[in-house]
Image: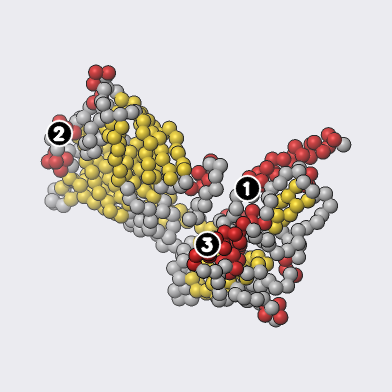
Amino acid sequence: MRACVFILLFTLLPVVISKAGRYSRLQSEPLSKTRCDLLCIDASKETKTKCRTECRAKEVKPGTCPMTENPRWAAACVEACNKDSQCDGTQRCCKLGCSSACKEPVDLLNIPGLPAMPILEEAKERRRSILIKWSGGVGDSARAVPGRVLYLLEEQHHLGPKYEEARLGDWTLITRTNKTKVSLKNLLKPGRWYRFRVAAVSAAGTRGYSAPSPPFTPRKGPRPPPPPKKLKVTPVRAQNGTVTVRLEWREPRSDLPVMKYKVFWSRRVRGLGGELDSVLVNHQTVPKDQTSFEIKDLQPNSMYFLQVQTISLFGLGKLRSEKAAIFYNTTAINEERPPESLQKKKEEKRIKAVRLNRFLWEDHKIKAKIAWLSTATKDKQPKRFYIHWTTVKCHQPIKDVKSLSAITEQTSFEIYELDYHCSYKVNVNTSGDTLNPDSEYILTVPPCEYFQRKINASINCKT
């Protein structure tokens, strides 16, 4: 008998421990937050914050915990929670013997004094908006709810031409209102399938979210992506009778996420009739996270036609943008700088092997420790190194573009003021000359969810 109990405990322990980790922190959960806002709505400005904090910490949700005989989770004797505020949604912290777990109440739909469970109508598309309605409850049960009632409308969606429930993302709060309908303008994107749900909350509590609405997609399908923006060409070097340039651009705003870019380049020559013809159009595919490309082996003193195209994926088909184009004359390199300065030999590079050692995270402040090697001899070893880093691209377009510099005497440095899901161009030099860097390294900071998984701390990635 003892062996059977031991096997059961050993089997359930990893599951219960994972739940304990999940409930080890307070959830910033919209249902409980709204209830506390209503309870503290009449508090003064000086006491409102304290009132909300105490409300969340001492929250007791309505409903009765299920009382089943010998539930499996009770056998492990592990506390997965110790108060209701540690449980999601309408779940309560239910205790049985030496164990506890978050469970749905058994009588939530029958408790008097709570707002009625809303019933969603099918979403209707207007000319420039989406109208969503729901019932607010009828009869004595609805009239018996004291005080104010607020409604929380949430959505989940996935991208694609066909609806697939398994691909739906997390529920996201759209709005909080005291009305039983809402008009959504410029919020739903083409090419996505949406579902909605709504919950009614009063100071007494809530019965939870309604059943999800039928799937909905805007009538207007996704458009092909726009071409890349702000093309520019930067000379890199002239060496062995050829020229290298860097073509740069910015990601366009699009109905669809960018899958990749395609870069085209061709030399323009004059034919017998004097017209310009392209000679041998070259092309190269560039990953979606890269917004620059070095074009090598160009002929000097020549005119080139450079183009970049955005490509997105929708279902099994590809949508291509128009090509953004720019002309570039490689003669300009010789005019800007003498060939000797551009034909910089590889052995003259005094910095190599720039690499990332690790990311450092503290209270949403991210640093990245990088290191490098100096190829100089001992007698010519530089006394200091110049580090410069610039924002190349951010997943969130609202992020500020940063350009920062620092000086160190070590062969490592912690780059600071980094943002989630952003890429940075990092140069390490032996002098302050940023036009001819001794090295270049692209540093990509992972999204917030990466740090949420790696760091044993509470991180709210939605703020």
Amino acid type, residue under disc 3 in the picture: Thr
Q: Is residue 211 visible?
A: no
Task: Give the side of residue 273 with respect to residue 437, left or right.
Answer: left
Q: Secondary structure at mark 2?
A: helix
Q: Residue furthest right?
A: 1
At 24% from the left edge and 18% from the top edge, which residue is drawn? 379
Disc 1 or 3, which lies upstream in sequence?
1
Instruction: Compute the Cα span from label 2 to label 3.
Output: 66 Å
Instruction: Compute the Cα span from label 1 to label 3.
Output: 23 Å
Disc 2 or 3, which lies upstream in sequence?
3
Instruction: Compute the Cα span from label 1 to label 2.
Output: 64 Å
Q: Which mark is residue 453?
A: none
Amino acid type, residue under disc 1 in the picture: Ser
Task: Give the side of residue 306 with respect to residue 368, left or right.
Answer: left
User: Residue 449 in the image: x percent, y percent?
Assistant: 51, 47
* Quadrant of the image occupied by residue 63: bottom right
Q: Which residue is mark 3?
A: 49
Comparing labels 2 and 3, the label whose residue is closer to the camera: 3
Q: Which mark is residue 24?
A: 1
Label 1: how many Cα within 10 Å (few below 14, some 14–19, many 20+): some
Comparing labels 1 and 2, the label whose residue is closer to the camera: 1
At 51% from the left edge and 58% from the top edge, which residue is drawn? 159
Viewer-nearest residue: 156 or 331: 156
User: Residue 8 in the image: x percent, y percent?
Assistant: 79, 40
Q: Answer whether labels 1 and 3 touch (C-beta < 8 Å).
A: no
Q: Which residue is mark 2?
A: 339
